């Protein structure tokens, strides 16, 4: 059977191993924490870039929407004018046909 001194020496060695392992674990956690802080900073920078792109895209879409509205308004005016001309020509032809039938 081992003596008390041998047992104490064994336990002291085990405690030192556990202490060393805990120190290594703390260092690993600190390193991981630093890496997460760096990652968080990168995510924040990416978030800012996405916000800028979203704002720029939104302004471009708004500009395109205004441009399309102006073009549709112009097209609507042109189509209305053309419709009036077509109806006018059809009425003139109808009156001419009626006039020819009345004479004839």
Image: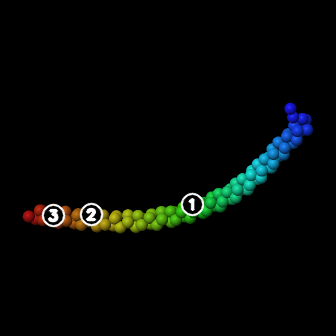
The answer to whether the residues at label 3 and label 1 have Cβ atoms under 8 Å apart is: no
The residue identified by callout 2 is 87
Residue that appears at 57% across and 60% down: 54
Instruction: Tell me the tag on residue 97.
Output: 3
Q: Position of residue 20 (x, y in %)?
A: 81, 48
Residue 44 visible in the snapshot: no
Is there any visible trace of residue 86 in the rendered image?
A: yes
Q: Position of residue 75 (x, y in %)?
A: 38, 66
Mark 2–mark 3 Cα distance, whole angstroms, equals: 15 Å
Q: Residue furthest left?
A: 104
**Secondary structure type for disc 3:** helix
Query: Where does residue 6 sit, x and y in percent of width and height?
Result: 88, 39
Secondary structure beneath disc 1?
helix
At x 81% / y 45%, what residue is drawn? 17
Quarter of the image for the N terminus: give it: top right
Disc 1 residue crowd, few under 14, some 14–19, many 20+, Cα 10 Å:
few
Which of the two labelled residues, at mark 2 and mark 3, occupies the earlier sequence position?
Answer: 2
Using the rendered view, name the quadrant where residue 89 is placed.
bottom left
Q: Is residue 22 left or right of residue 41?
A: right
Label whose residue precedes the other's in the sequence (2 or 1): 1
Q: Residue at x 91, y 38 (%)?
A: 5
Viewer-proximal residue, 48 or 96? 48
């Amino acid at each position: 059977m081992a003596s008390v001194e041998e047992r104490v020496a064994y336990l002291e060695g085990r405690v030192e191993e556990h202490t060393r392992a805990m120190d290594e674990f703390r260092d690993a956690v600190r390193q991981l924490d630093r890496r997460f802080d760096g990652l968080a900073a990168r995510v924040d920078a990416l978030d800012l870039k996405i916000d800028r792109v979203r704002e720029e895209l939104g302004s471009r879409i708004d500009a395109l929407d205004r441009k399309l509205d102006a073009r549709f308004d112009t097209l609507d005016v042109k189509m209305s004018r053309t419709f009036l001309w077509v109806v006018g020509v059809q009425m003139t032809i109808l009156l001419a046909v009626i006039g020819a039938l009345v004479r004839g």
